[in-house]
Amino acid sequence: MDIFALVRRRTLDVLADLVDCGELPRNFDLGRVAVAVPRAGTPGDVVVDAGSVHVPPRGVVDGLGAAPDVAAVAAVGGGRFAVTLGPAAVLGAVSAVLDGRCPLPMAPGGAMSPGGRPQPASGAASLAELRAEVLADVLAGLATAVDLAPPIAVPPRSVPVVLRGAVAGAGSTRPDDVLALIGADAFRFAVASCRPHAALHLDLDVLGDRCRADPSFWVPYAHTRARSMLREAAAAPVGLGPGVLAAADLADLTDGGELALARLVARHARLVADAAAAAAPQRIAAHLRQVADAVHHQWNRSKDQPQLRFVNEERRDLTKARLGLVTASALVLRSGLGLLGLSAPDEMR
């Protein structure tokens, strides 16, 4: 299930009804209706741009809100509406990821497998030049993954890279020295996390320190945790392997934390497409941090609250549902990390 296509179809039906009853002009352009992932600070699962500030908000809100798979609709200005879907629609989208009906974007060369892409060969004399090379590689990879033409604009080599932290004052600013200190993955994630034309700030006291504040550790660690849970489940008496989980019925997932993670999984493919079209890899990096936080959060909660454990030998269906969500989350993390040219390890030492 593509929740974005679903909401767009619902919106077109509502707008067509408003045209028929005379609340909208006959020449109202339905082709301008677009849907997108909500940006930071915007509620909902899908944002609808109805293409005109003249759309009567009440009519659209009431019409969309009457759909059985819609939980709430709010006008957010400028002819845009934030749509929150009900759990069944969100979980249906996660099921589509699990069983392959909604294939996730893959890095060039099929880098859904561990390893990612190497750093581009570089003779960069400065961190700004190296940042531009890495950014160009990320943008080209994203464009290829979603079948877009590579970005025409070459990322600037003059946007500064600012070193911060106690280590920065006494250290070298040569690219090789900085990479030796924080690691190539930390630099690459930092580049992908920053708006292309904004100054890149590197905290040398944090990056490469294997802590939550370092996303190049925290995000792959979430993938490692997910894979660890799945290995343990496969070895448990319930015996749930990948084939069984791909067909899992997720309807038993009712916990708020589980549904929050499911909403992040459901938006991944569209978010990647939007980020690639806008040459904005920072959206993917931010999304991966949200997914990682949600995975770690559920893992920690399962340790403190027995009713949230992923494997419940007395409730096989619930176990299948929870591990199905874990599987889909791992697929999203692997997809996103690969798109940024980073590895998604199954184990960490």
Image (spheres, rainbow, N blue to C red):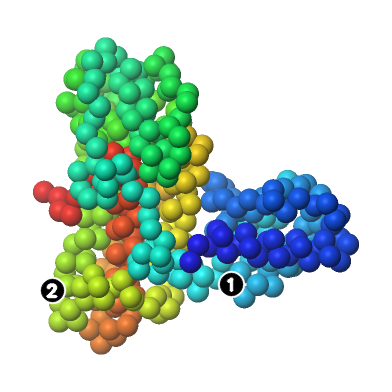
Q: Is residue 92 left or right of residue 20?
A: left
Could you tell me if residue 77 is visible in this image? Answer: no
Callout 1 environment at 10 Å: few (<14), some (14 to 19), or many (20+)? some
The x and y percentages for residue 218 are: 28, 47
> Where 330 sits versus 106, above or below?
below
Image spot of residue 238 (x, y percent): 19, 81
Crowding at dot 2, Cα within 10 Å, few <14 / some 14-19 / many 20+, comes out as few
- SS label for mark 1: loop
- Say which residue appears at 80% left-offset and 52% top-offset: 28
Q: Residue at x 88, y 62 (%)?
A: 22
Residue 203 sits in quarter: top left
Q: Nearer the viewer, residue 158 or 221?
A: 158
Residue found at the far right of this picture: 22
Going by the numbered disc 2, the residue's amino acid type is: Ala
Whether 119 is drawn above or below 277: the answer is above
- What residue sits right under mark 1 in the picture? 69
Residue at mark 2 to residue at mark 1: CA–CA distance: 37 Å
Query: How many numbered markers are drawn?
Result: 2
Task: Inspect the image, locate mark 1, and give the three-letter code of the amino acid beneath it.
Answer: Asp
- Residue 245 position in % (x across, y down): 28, 73
Specify whether residue 114 is in view.
yes
- Per the image, label 2 sits on a secondary structure element best described as helix
Q: Which residue is mark 2?
A: 235
Q: Which residue is most to the left? A: 349
Whether 41 is drawn above or below 234: the answer is: above
Say left or right for 218 vs 345: right
Front one among 179 and 142: 142
